[in-house]
Amino acid sequence: MADSVYISSSLTKDQLLFLQLLNEKEVEYFTIYGIEEQLSHSFSNINEVLENLVHKNFIYRLQKGYYAVKSFNNQNVIGTFISQNSAVAYWSALNIHGLTSRFPNKVFIQTTKRKKDKTILGVHYQFVTIPERKRVGITSLGYGNNSYAITDIEKTIIDCFDLSIYSGGFDLLLSAFSLAKLNSNKMIEYAEAVNNLSVTKRLGFLSELLNKKGLQTFIKYAKLKVNKKYTLIDSAGKDSGEFILNWRLRLNVSMNEIVNLSKELY
């Protein structure tokens, strides 16, 4: 709190008006930089109004300059609101899309702007920075104040294979991949954007092995991308197992294990 801000003992006229306008305009989260325009009203000292309302527990500060009313607690909205060019992604998106029943112990947010991880109201947010070229496959869920950006199903699958440390583990990811209804054209588009040949080979092989419906075009695309270097099917596993020549993959998880894991629900 700034030293120069006066904290009143009770709600002042400006503080009451601010709360009234928030309610009338149905504003539940905002920044100090744009709130007066949203409310169509200028206050003589907006910083003082906000500091007082935080102090009196009518609103809370998400981070410097970012606020929400006390009743608002949509963690997906908050995570994307406080970060630029962002979307809910990875394990969090797998869960929201119904591809796993396992809940992560944090909210994963993908963003093109570097940001430190934060904890807000007991919720841990992990921000994963990606280059602009990887920001594709973004859709939205929810309505009104509860609307937020999220990677679509195809991009979520590719992202999780690209950065598997944020996916909840290979077993969970296999199950999610097996459950997901995927579009070949989207898979190709996002694979091109992510530009990770190891991911393309893994997904092409798994699509073929598990006989994924509607992915024949993607399988053909993936085969054209196969290079000479061998890649582990589970990037976090040991360097061992059967070599698959036509996909240049080493199965440190056997075919039988892959098939069995893909049938289990996580």
Image (cartoon, helix red, strand yellow):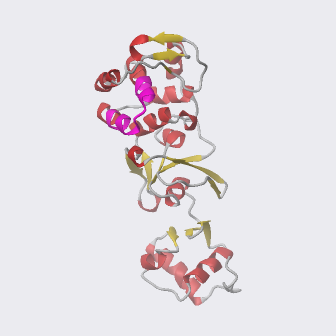
Where the N terminus falls, by quadrant? bottom right
x and y, in percent, of residue 46 in the image: 55, 82
| Picture quadrant of residue 215 | top left
User: Compared with residue 91, is residue 64 higher up or lower down, i.e. above or below?
Assistant: below
Is 190 colored magenta in this rendering? yes
Q: Residue at x 31, y 22 (%)?
A: 224
Foreground pick, 63 / 72? 63
Relative to 146, say whether 28 is above or below.
below
Q: Is residue 115 left or right of residue 211?
A: right
Q: Nearer the viewer, residue 74 or 226?
A: 226
The number of callouts visible is 0
The percent position of residue 58, horizontal first and vertical second, equals 62, 73
**Residue shown at 43%/78% (left/top)?**
37
Residue closest to the eye, 185 or 128? 128
Q: Is residue 264 above or below residue 180?
A: above
The C terminus - image quarter:
top right
Image quadrant assignment for residue 118: bottom right
Would you identify the image quadrant in which residue 238 lies? top right
- Identify the main secondary structure in magenta: helix
Image: magenta residue range: 188-203
Residue at image position (47%, 58%) is 84
Q: How far across and how far down the image is residue 184, in percent?
A: 31, 31
Q: Nearer the viewer, residue 37 or 33?
A: 33
